[in-house]
Image (cartoon, rainbow, N blue to C red):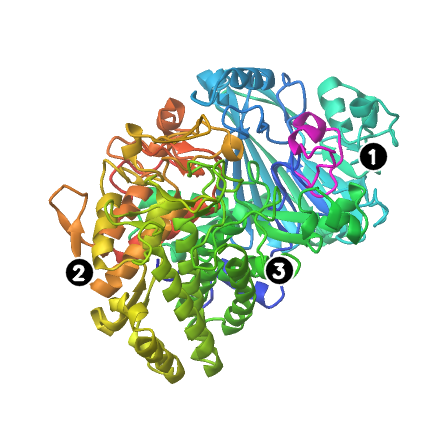
Amino acid sequence: MGQQNVGRDVNEGDGRVRAEASRLIERGDGVPWLRWGPYLSERQWGTVREDYSADGNAWAYFTHDHARSRAYRWGEDGLAGISDDRQQLCFALALWNGADPILKERLFGLTNGEGNHGEDVKEYYFYLDNTPTHSYMRYLYKYPHKAYPYGDLIATNARRGAEDYEYELIDTGVFDDDRYFDVTVEYAKGTPDDILIAIEVTNRGAEPANLVLVPTLWFRNTWSEGAEPRPTIERVADFADATVIRADHTGVGVRFLYAAGLPPALFCENETNTDRLFGEPNATKYVKDGIGEAVVNGKSEAAHTTGPGTKGAVQYEVEVAAGATERFELRLTDLDPESFRAQGSPSGAEFAQMIAQRRQEADEFYADVLPDTIGDDAALVTRQALAGLLWSKQFYAYDVTRWLGGHGVTTRAAQQRSALRNATWFHMVNEDIISMPDKWEYPWYAAWDLAFHAVSLAVVDVDFAKGQLALMLDERYLHPNGQIPAYEWNFSDVNPPVHAWAVMRLYEAEKETRGTGDIRFLEEAFHKLALNYTWWVNRKDPDGNNVFGGGFLGLDNIGVFDRSAPLPTGGHLAQADGTAWMAFYALEMLEIALELARHDPSYQSMASKFLEQYLWIASAMDDPDDPKGSLWDDQDGFFYDVLLTPDGHTERLKVRSLVGLLPLAACVVLRPEDVNQLPDFMARVQWLRTHRPQLAARFPALAEPGIGNRRLLSLLDESKLRRLLARMLDETEFLGDHGIRSVSAFHRDNPFVVNVAGQEYRVDYLPAESNTGMFGGNSNWRGPIWLPTNFLLIRGLLHYASYYGDQFTIEYPTGSGDELPLKDIAMHLSERLMGIFLRDENGLRPVFGGTEMFQQSPHWKDLIPFYEYFHGDNGAGLGASHQTGWTALVARMMQVLGQELEPDTKIGVDAESPSGP
């Protein structure tokens, strides 16, 4: 969708570089502004990494109930938390309202088996602000006065089926009459190692309410396996009006936590309470849940007040008057008390001034990033989307060989024989900060998600974005056979090959904003991507005819069969999306090779290779010599998967879905300046025209100049393009009020049904949640609107527009009689997608659906959840509620559209100005 504005180094009026942009420059020069950040997970329990069960049931092996008492091996989680970039020392909030049965130290949600649509967090928390260096961060958590209804949520959801709505925390009544606290946390960095923490607790209710606030500092347990010495956390002498806790670790060094107001302190060890969980004697007197036991159950013997330990906290007890706010100030820093004797108090006026300064610098940074044509409401949405993306960074550790050793698989031969998940990924050692899809529902990286994250991250931090793509291609991640790891539940699953596209987009983004692209990054990525491309060709083209499979390819339940499992019919699928993805991959590799060839002519031969590969793939999708096996159905004007059975029978599976629309995204436009200086490449093009005339003749746009003498490489000629768009832009099929649906609404009344050996398989139009347990049942590609695929379809439209120009028009919507150019249609589709989050003419946000508190309350209506996907008919948010991984693409859309608008036109100003959270 064009190039990103990556937070350019904007100057002040006197020529100085703005503060946050300056920090990004310093980061590049080695100043460790990213040493500390929001790197805690929001759910470490129930993950594959922590699963040492015999049956691979990660959810049952390490539960939420275990989490408060059981030490993790691979990472830590917490509420509104931060850590250093090796997650050695962690800080987070804990809360107690006097009614809960346990200390609120982490977010609660249902496991995959407990939820009627799979796993689901049952809390309300919001990422309000964040800068690329995490110099300023703001987070809001809503905590009820009443006891948290753990049992009610589990029991009620258990009674509901796949056809029912989910039972949410707000449905339990605990927020009725505004009987809750807003707990807001602000972090501001004075220096890379000096972190100011301001916590404000507001009572939204009409009566006073009590709260115990327990800010907690602890070490990740890296010593139990004997790899490192045990660190210490202990109370030292108070300084001024602050309780002082000292933390000492061989890796992170010495740090101090200052807590203003002289609150009492509590200490224990980050060690498992084996007595509670397993009925075995504890190895130490003070165990992980000791602080919680002391606060909630009054067991003073469970924790001690001075240390040393490996987990420490301070305890504020406060009664908050109705409508009032209480403020607490803490500071996590490398500055010892002696330093403050010279510099002043660790809290107080200077503290408040620094918080306010970093908040203002964040405002200035985003004012420079966002176009002036973005109105107040759109700016609020964009900033929260980017804040969520930045808050979703997480330290991710997973050494597969070490993990297998924990299962007793300790030799290479045993690994080869093992049926344990990921046993073939023995080479993998991950210890990095990675952008997660959702730090509660998906607290592990997903390869194709990460490509979209990177495109959005480039809006504010192109260097970090490049690093994320480079990780997936690093030898510690990329399999020796060339496969990119999918996700921890099964690294060998296959995700759509979108990394080459993302790499090229980041290169272009940097070229636009800095004047030159990172050619070394492009070249290194290209070589690793060539390995991955070869893996695809060797593994996912079963018949060697350039028609590809790949399994579910990220689209989970979109097919009538589970596309990652053996088919009930036998045989295999020729997949329209798998083949389109490979055409897309070949084109992006062609783009990269052409750019590299302008710097090194030897890459022209690689460009020629990918051009020819693309032409063969494109030809195979619609082979006139094999009309029954063709993925294009000329009668329907649509692409379908084709079932190939063992007896040689072929059958198109006529499900109208994104599978058939994705070929629209597989296109690229070549400008004369892209190729005219590459004589060897142009000679190869001419050779193809001469020696493969039938192949070249099928792609007339390669020879016929478009606008500006451009050439088009695409899977669709003009006739196919018009026919496919007629379906996509039909409001009775794919075009919803808020974007392109994943399955046509045609299937609402006309389900696709196949019977195999007495078993019915079907695809209905399901605009909300899935009605099957396929792929865990926690996502649905049979009707809802998904941001990443919409983003790629819009990109395709813009490419076609740049070739055909404004003289190419088509009905929008289909049947309306109104003809529009493709660029205008792309902008209109972007507006529909952005409209999910923006207030409409009635002041309502479609993303909130029918939840009245979100729609009407001044304390909720500007808190934007960025869901995983959206209702195909009304735009309500569905699935994971904090998927500001790829759903942050809305920020990129806002930016692109804002740059296209006239200066006196603004996005997101039709409704009242936002009141602010």
Residue at numbered disc 3: 481
- The three-letter amino acid code for the residue at tag 2 is Asp
| 3 or 2: tag closer to the N-terminus | 3
Magenta stretch mostly in which secondary structure?
loop
- Residue 153 located within the stretch drawn in magenta: no
Q: x and y percent of residue 573 in the render? A: 45, 46
Residue at numbered disc 2: 806
Q: x and y percent of residue 183 in the render? A: 55, 31
Magenta segment range? 49-77
Say which mark, if any, is on residue 306.
1
Q: In front: 490, or 696?
A: 696
User: Can the viewer see residue 843 in this picture?
Assistant: yes
- The three-letter amino acid code for the residue at tag 1 is Thr
Mark 3 packing: few (<14 Cα in 10 Å), some, or many (20+)? few
Say which mark, if any, is on residue 355.
none
Residue for point 43% across, 51% down: 578
Res 604 → quadrant: bottom left
Q: Which of marks 3 and 2 is in front?
A: 3
Q: Which of marks 1 and 2 is in front?
A: 2
- The three-letter amino acid code for the residue at tag 3 is Asn
Q: Nearer the viewer, mark 3 or mark 1?
A: 3
Residue for point 11% across, 44% down: 817
Q: In front: 171, or 501?
A: 501
